[in-house]
Amino acid sequence: MKAAPPNTDFGVVLLDIEGTTTPVSFVYDVLFPYARRHAKRYLEDHLSSPDVQSDLEGLRRQHAIDLSEGLGPPALAGDSPGDRIESLAAYIHWLMDRDRKLTPLKSLQGRIWQEGYEKGELLGQVFDDVPRAFSLWNDRGKRVCIYSSGSVLAQRLLFAHTTSGDLTGFISDYFDTNVGGKRDRESYRRIAASLGRAASEIVFVSDVTAELDAARSAGLLTVLCVRPGNPQPTAAAAHPVVDTFDEFFSAD
């Protein structure tokens, strides 16, 4: 039998995106392929941007680390700007193929997606219960926050352009890997400190058990979200389990 999620004993609900608010398929079948297709063209159009240059400098530093660790990344070379862009795009593709959660990569992806949303080529997806839960949590004085490996820009864009409309009015704060990795206990302590809340006042909802383990070790309440397309728990879950956010309100 599933353990019931907490209904009232939290002031903040901290939500993962992929596999929690949003289908995994949207991330892997829509967002990632879009970034991959447009990476080279985006670099050609925005190479002089200071923000893009900052992202690329971070990627170059990571490339040196990947080389030193013998991971065999594609070479960053080229005598002309075109060749350099070609090699940077190849490295971006290489990182994406390995699903690397690197802050400069996620930042650059967010910038590419921003163009896609603004052009109407992308429309964010959320599960049907998400807008309903956001509204109810807000009505009950709960603070809704997002923590994802995707950049804060990417998070805001997704929730501002969903098939259910603009949901950003329900969300008070966003956190990405600038606060730390999602499997690092200290990340959750930093989030609690940033929010000015005790860890025990925050419930973290994710589809990844290792993330929930880290959050719980930092003192947060935790809930495992098992959505369509997510792996099913293979044994008795170590965290309360929900299939939809409606279960947070089932005891009403």
Image: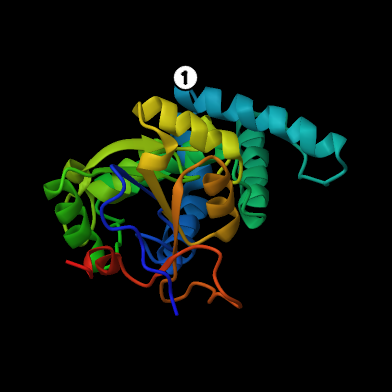
Residue in view at x 66 percent, y 36 percent = 83
Q: Which of 83 and 27 is in front in this view?
A: 27
- Quarter in which the N terminus is drawn: bottom left
- Answer yes or no: is residue 213 visible: yes
Quarter of the rendering occupied by the C terminus: bottom left
Q: Between residues 175 and 190, which one lies in front from this camera angle?
A: 190
- Residue, far left: 139
Q: Is residue 250 left or right of residue 152?
A: left
Above or below, 122 against 214 in this view is below
| Direction top: furthest residue | 50
Where residue 193 sits, quadrant-wise, is top left
Within the image, what quadrant is residue 46 found in? top left
Q: Is residue 49 visible?
A: no
Across the whole image, how many numbered discs are drawn on residues? Answer: 1
Residue 103 x %, y %: 55, 35
Residue drawn at (62%, 27%) of the image: 58
Q: In the image, residue 69 lies at what x, y percent?
A: 86, 39
Q: Residues within 10 Å of mark 1 (few under 14, many from 20)?
A: few
Please name the colour scheme applied to the rendered image.
rainbow
Residue topped by disc 1: 50
Nearer-the-camera pick, 120 or 97: 97
Q: Where is residue 230 in the image (x, y as percent from the top left)?
A: 49, 72
Disc 1 element:
helix
Q: Is residue 239 above or below residue 78?
A: below
Type of amino acid under label 1: Pro
Using the rendered view, name the quadrant where residue 205 is placed: bottom left
The answer to whether residue 49 is left or right of residue 235 is left
Residue 134 or 140: which is nearer the viewer?
Answer: 140
* In this view, 119 is above or below 218: below
Residue under the image location 23 percent in, 47 percent down = 160
Q: Position of residue 49 (x, y in %)?
A: 45, 23
